[in-house]
Image (cartoon, rainbow, N blue to C red):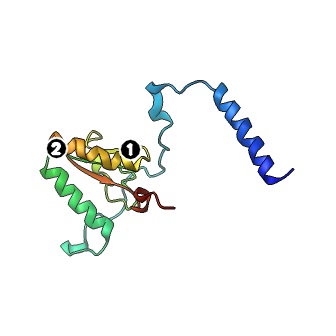
């Protein structure tokens, strides 16, 4: 049997299995939508030593996001893996959800168009959204 035929049979089998599966319960989406993180607490240094400047981009982002959230009550920060403990691909939001609330710093599904597009609607009603997309190549549709 050729590889192409094996794959076709596998896809057809998985498709039939999916059709027979029950629909997901929208009331418990959060129990399976996001994988649990192994990071249970922030242990890293989040400010420059002795008040100096830092060249670390993640630390600079963390500092600016902290200032933004502290000073602008309508500020929200959301995107892929930024909520909870992980705090984004560069850890720029680590601990911000605990400090400013999960209603202001939260995860979204991996939907780059939604993440970027939602900022227009939020801005129109006075919210100050900041979003994280892990890598800009994901927004261009290029492979």
Q: Identify the residue shown where x is 79% and y is 47%.
A: 6
Label 2: which secondary element: loop
Q: Is residue 64 above or below residue 83?
A: below
Q: Is residue 98 visible?
A: no
Q: Is residue 63 visible?
A: yes
Q: Which residue is mark 2?
A: 74
Estimate the x, y position of residue 111 in percent, counting from the top left. 42, 46
Estimate the x, y position of residue 134 in percent, counting from the top left. 40, 58
User: Distance of mark 2 from mark 1, alpha carbons?
Assistant: 18 Å
Q: Which residue is mark 1?
A: 108
Q: Callout 1: 10 Å neighbours few (<14), some, many (20+)? A: some
Judged left or right of residue 74, residue 113 is right
Residue 45 picture quarter: bottom left
Residue 8 picture quarter: top right
Estimate the x, y position of residue 91 in percent, counting from the top left. 36, 59
Label 1: which secondary element: loop
Judged left or right of residue 85, residue 120 is left
Dot 2 or dot 1, earlier in sequence: 2
Q: Identify the residue shown where x is 16% and y is 44%.
A: 74
């Amino acid at each position: 049997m050729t590889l192409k035929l094996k794959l076709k049979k596998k896809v057809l089998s998985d498709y039939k299995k999916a059709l027979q599966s029950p629909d997901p319960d929208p009331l418990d989406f959060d129990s399976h939508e996001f994988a649990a993180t192994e990071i249970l607490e922030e242990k890293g240094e989040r400010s420059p030593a002795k008040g100096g400047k830092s060249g670390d981009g993640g630390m600079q982002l963390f500092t600016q996001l902290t200032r933004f959230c502290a000073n602008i009550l309508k500020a929200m920060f959301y995107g892929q893996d930024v909520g909870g403990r992980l705090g984004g691909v560069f850890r720029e939001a680590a601990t911000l959800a605990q400090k400013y609330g999960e209603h202001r710093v939260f995860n979204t599904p991996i939907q780059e168009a939604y993440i970027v597009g939602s900022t227009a609607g939020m801005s129109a009603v006075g919210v100050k959204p900041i979003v994280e997309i892990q890598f800009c190549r994901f927004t261009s549709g290029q492979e």
